[in-house]
Structures are given as C-alpha cells and as structure tokens.
C-alpha cells in the first residue's frame, strides 16, 4: 500500500512560514536541494492545498529561466510530470499535471492507495496535512529542520490535541546545519 507522507522544511521552533509570511530562511543549499531532488523521485502523487499549489506554480514554467542550474532543471522536469491533486474551495481550475480534488481528503487518499500507481502520496501544506493527521491518514512525517528560530508563523504541526506515537526511521545532518528527520507513525 502507498504511504502518505507529510514533508516540509521547518524552523527549529516549529514553523514552516515565519510571522512575516516568508520562508526564505528555508531555501536549500546545493546539498539539501540534491536531497530534495532524490526524495521527489520516490513520490507518485502530491496533494497540495491552494497556497502551496500557488507557490509551486513557479516550477511549471521555471525551465524557461536561463539561469537554472542542472539540478533545478531536473527538479522542474520531475515536478511538472508529477501528478498533483489540489484541495481548494476557491480555485475553479489548475494548471499543469494537476487536478482539483473531487472528493474529500480521506476519499482522495483512499482512491490513490487503492488505484494504480506507485510511489508515496506526499502532502504539502500545514492545513491540509493537519486535516490528514487528524483523520489518521499520515503514515510518515519527514522534517527538514533548518537552523533558525523565526519566533512564530504557520506551525508545521496542527494542534488537534491527539497523541501520535512515532518511530524514528532516518536522520541525516547536512553541512548547512539542517537536519532531516523521518518518522513513521506507530499503528
């Protein structure tokens, strides 16, 4: 069965976006970007909320930018080809290899798990991931902890008051001071 993973960069104090609405502090160096590129190859479908979808639209045309390096060009190709499901109450259409969700989150994940296809089902965006976690749909949490304290903003974890026991599967430190943590949900 395909795993559902929630993977985002996070400040050491637990935020994916700072209080000023920016996340430039999470921009990966070359080593971390290569790690993200390798991780993207294991993803079969990406679920996104509207805000993350709109942020990631850059990659739909990034290959037209002459200053991209080889790794960024490879990322662009992988991202454009990756099937995406967008959850939004305000968008009427989406671009690229994306579709608007037709069912609720649990229905969409069940259909993806039961349907054809390989690779993880990745969830991006704090609100969407919090909804998936509240319904017990997340199998793994993948966190790239950035060496910065931002003091507030959008938290990585939704606060629904439920306990979830995790098993540490992988840790990987990077020269920049970032540390990747991968936890599997104990069921």
Image (cartoon, rainbow, N blue to C red):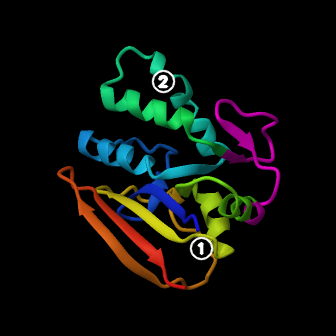
Judged left or right of residue 72, residue 133 is: right
Which quarter of the figure has residue 121? bottom right
Of 184 and 15, nearer the camera is: 184
Of 161 and 135, nearer the camera is: 135
Whole-percent x and y of residue 176?
A: 21, 50
Whole-percent x and y of residue 102?
A: 82, 50
Of 8 and 5, nearer the camera is: 5
Instruction: Indicate which label's residue lies in the foreground, 1 or 2.
Output: 2
- The residue beneath circle 2 is 62
- The residue beneath circle 1 is 159
Q: Is residue 104 magenta?
A: yes
Label 1: state its secondary structure: loop
Question: Magenta-highlighted stretch: main secondary structure?
Answer: loop
Q: Is residue 117 at least partly visible in the picture? A: yes
Magenta region, residue range: 85-107
Vertical comparison of 20 with 140: above or below: above
For the point 70% across and 63% down, the residue is 114
């Amino acid at each position: 069965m395909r795993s559902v993973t929630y993977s985002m960069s996070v400040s050491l104090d637990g935020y994916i976006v700072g209080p000023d609405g920016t996340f430039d502090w999470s921009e990966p160096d070359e080593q971390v970007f290569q790690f993200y590129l390798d991780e993207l190859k294991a993803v079969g479908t990406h679920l996104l909320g509207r805000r993350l979808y709109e942020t990631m639209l850059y990659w739909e045309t990034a290959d037209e930018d002459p200053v991209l390096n080889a790794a960024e060009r490879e990322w662009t190709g992988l991202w454009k080809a990756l099937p995406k499901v967008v959850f939004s109450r305000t968008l009427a259409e989406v671009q690229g290899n994306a579709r608007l969700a037709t069912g609720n989150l649990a229905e969409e994940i069940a259909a993806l798990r039961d349907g054809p296809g390989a690779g993880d089902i990745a969830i991006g965006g704090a609100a969407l991931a919090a909804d998936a976690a509240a319904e017990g749909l997340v199998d793994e949490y993948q966190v790239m902890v950035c060496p910065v304290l931002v003091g507030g903003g959008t938290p990585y974890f939704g606060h629904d008051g439920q306990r979830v026991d995790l098993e540490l599967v992988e840790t990987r430190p990077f020269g920049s001071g970032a540390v990747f943590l991968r936890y599997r949900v104990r069921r």
